[in-house]
Amino acid sequence: DAGVTQSPTHLIKTRGQHVTLRCSPISGHKSVSWYQQVLGQGPQFIFQYYEKEERGRGNFPDRFSARQFPNYSSELNVNALLLGDSALYLCASSLASGTGGSYEQYFGPGTRLTVT
Amino acid sequence: AQSVTQLDSQVPVFEEAPVELRCNYSSSVSVYLFWYVQYPNQGLQLLLKYLSGSTLVESINGFEAEFNKSQTSFHLRKPSVHISDTAEYFCAVTKGVGSGTYKYIFGTGTRLKVLA
C-alpha cells in the first residue's frame, strides 16, 4: 500500500509569492495534519483536518491556510512568502481525529520549500 | 499546554555500545507518547509509541522506551547500536483520548551518530 505522498518534493520561490503544497493520505485515513520543520528543529504543528473540517490550528499567521477535499487529500497554501518560511513541510495522515481509534500519525517525505 | 524537552542535541556512540536518548515532557493531562526517527532528506518514521498498558514498549529493530509518569519521562534505549541507527530522533507528545482534536508536540530532536 502507498504511504503518504506529497508534491512537489522541492520548491524554490521568491519573497512575496504564493505557494501550494499537496498531500495524499494513506488510503482509508480521514485525518491530515501539516507540520513545518525548520532546519535543526522539531516539526511545528500548523493545521489538522478531519472529514474536511479544520480541527486544530497552530500558532501560524493567517498567511497559512489549508483545506481538505472529499477524497481526503489536502492542500497547504502560504501567501506573501517570507524568507523565514523556508522549511520542510510535512504532511501526516491518521485514522481518527482524536476522539477514538488510532493515534499514530504517518508522515510523508515532505516538501522542501526554499524562499529567496 | 504540553511541552517536550530533549536534553541532548547530539549523542555520539561507538558501534555495538548501548545508548539512551532522553525525553521529558510536561502536561497537566494524560498524554500519549511517541518516538520518531528521521533519516537524512526523509520524513518521519514511527519508531514506537506509548498509549496505555505496559510502561515498557519495544520496536521491531531493538529500541525500547519506558514511560515513567512520576518523572514525566519517556527515554529511548538500545542495548547495542549499529551504524544504520545514525539518524535524528524526535520525541513527541499528544493529549489523550477525548481531546476532540490532537496535535503532536515535538522535541527539538537528538542526532544519534554511531561511530565505527
Image: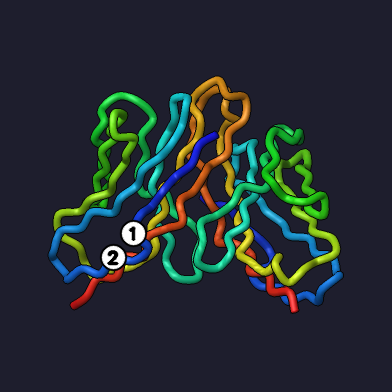
In the image: residue B6, left or right of residue A71: left
Chain ID of residue with mark 1: B
Q: Residue at x 55, y 61 (%)?
A: A109
Q: Nearer the viewer, residue A72 or A11?
A: A11
Tell me which amino acid carries mark 1.
Answer: Asp
Residues tagged 2 and 1 counted as in contact (Cβ below 8 A): yes
Looking at the rendered structure, which numbered label has been put on residue B8?
Answer: 1
Q: Nearer the viewer, residue B10 or B66?
A: B10
Q: Position of residue A69 (x, y in %)?
A: 78, 42
Disc 2 from disc 1: Cα separation: 7 Å
Q: Residue at x 67, y 44 (%)?
A: A58
Looking at the rendered structure, which numbered label has been put on residue B11?
Answer: 2
Quadrant of the rendered image containing residue B115: bottom left
Q: Residue at x 44, y 25 (%)?
A: B30
Tell me which amino acid carries mark 2.
Answer: Val
Q: Quadrant of the C terminus of chain B?
A: bottom left
